[in-house]
Image (cartoon, helix red, strand yellow):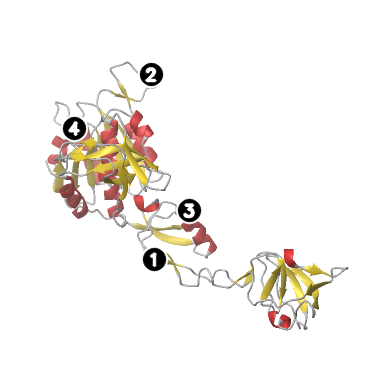
Amino acid sequence: MINYKKAKKILIKSKIKIQDEIIKSSKALNRINVSDIYSTVNYPAATNAAFDGFAINSNETNKLNKKNSQNFKILKTISAGDNPIINKIKKNVTVEVMTGALIPRGFDTIIPIEKIIFNRDKKYIQINKKIKKNQHIRFAGSDYKKKDLIIKKGSIIQSAHVLAFKTLGVTKIKVKKKPNILFFSTGNEISNNKKIVNWKVRNSNSHYINSLSKNFMFNFIDGGILRDKDTKLFKKQIEKSIKSKIDIIITSGAVSAGKYDFVPYVVKKLNLSNFFKGVLIRPGKPILFAKLKGFEKAIFGLPGNPISSSACFRFFVYPYLLNILGVKAEKPFKAKLKNDYSKNKEIIRFLKARLTSTKDGKLELEVLKGQESFKIKSFVQSNVWGLFKDGQSKFKKGELIDCFSAIGPNKNFF
């Protein structure tokens, strides 16, 4: 049995190749871009109004004061989307501009509508003070200039990025294809029926991991349930997958050392370049990983208990996905431990925990009751995983603990 650090090193050097594809930027949510993406235009595209008001030439107000006011003739109203061109602009004139309207040449500042003094027939505005240049104006390229970097390669594309792409004229981007994951549940006890007898177990792990595929950048393919005596069938499914577009095979259950735990037996007989079975962690100690030699295929054997399976996906499969898709490894964030905790010194514990903040904004981590791998109530109540490192058995209140989000990579949230 190896430690978690060594297991992660094996995962890193067992990287499989995932091909690229070009997609519409509007469909890029949660995909991984394979190159830096730059703006194709200046944004704003042209200088425009930040407020509803009246645009003037500020130089024409240099000598104005309460004793020396000046009327400015209103030429027209310009709304966002209107052509701003005005020919032969005379002295002491103004145009009414709506927010987002382009500023015509010859005008360089805006007086907000709330500060305007009109004459009786509202054909003129009166100005009785010096107006500064460039007030309430959005300048062309003041947000993004053409060729400015929008997002670095290897980023997880979020909704804000999609907004930027569409605003800045980026219509298509090159991303990593979604890895195809073939998932098998195992065991005679597993059932897909709505009503079950008490010696059966509802098939939940496959549905959980399928739900993760919506945000975790992979395609989920349900391989069904392998029964206790389906050793040969599992071997055939692997051989079939080698010739298919499947990238990763994941099993849940049948990975320990029991009479019907056939997954390690089958996997060990394959031609492998890298392999481990058993890691000094809880939950999920029996976890298995293998890389097929000569093929861009990998296999994960997850334990069958729901929390063991969830923890192993979060701390083994998900980091592996980030690596093969070209995303930098996520880093934990820290929170102060709210309650004392003790564990075996030799192992790492992945604990269901609740993250909260104090009145002064400091993060606190509470280890929840019910850490057994079959208990799901505490999993529902949790919002983070706490990683309690090996080499230490006692953790005191106030100690800083590594935390990992339960809903996505840490870099997206902290």
Between label 3 and label 4, give the one nearer the viewer: 3
Q: Judging from the image, what secondary structure is the residue with disc 1 in?
A: loop
> Disc 2 and disc 3: Cα gap in Å?
40 Å
Instruction: Answer whether residue 246 is visible to the viewer in this image.
Output: no
Q: Residues within 10 Å of mark 1 (few under 14, many from 20)?
A: some
Of residues 232 and 124, the one drawn nearer to the viewer in this rendering = 124
Amino acid type of the residue that numbered disc 3 sits on in the rendered structure: Ser
Q: Judging from the image, what secondary structure is the residue with disc 3 in?
A: helix
Is residue 388 left or right of 87 when viewed as pictured? left
Q: Judging from the image, what secondary structure is the residue with disc 4 in?
A: helix
Compared with 151, 321 (above or below) is above
Residue at 28% from the left image edge and 49% from the top image edge: 319
Q: Are marks 3 and 1 in contact (CB under 8 Å)?
A: no
User: Residue 221: x and y, percent?
Assistant: 34, 40
Of residues 15 and 305, the one drawn nearer to the viewer in this rendering = 305
Amino acid type of the residue that numbered disc 4 sits on in the rendered structure: Lys
Compared with 40, 181 (above or below) is above
Q: Which mark is residue 159?
A: 3
| Mark found first going from the N terminus, 3 or 1 | 1
Between label 2 and label 1, give the one nearer the viewer: 1
> Disc 2 and disc 4: Cα gap in Å?
30 Å
User: Residue 387: x and y, percent?
Assistant: 26, 43
Q: Residues within 10 Å of mark 3 (few under 14, many from 20)?
A: few
Q: Which mark is residue 232?
A: 4
Q: Which mark is residue 195?
A: 2
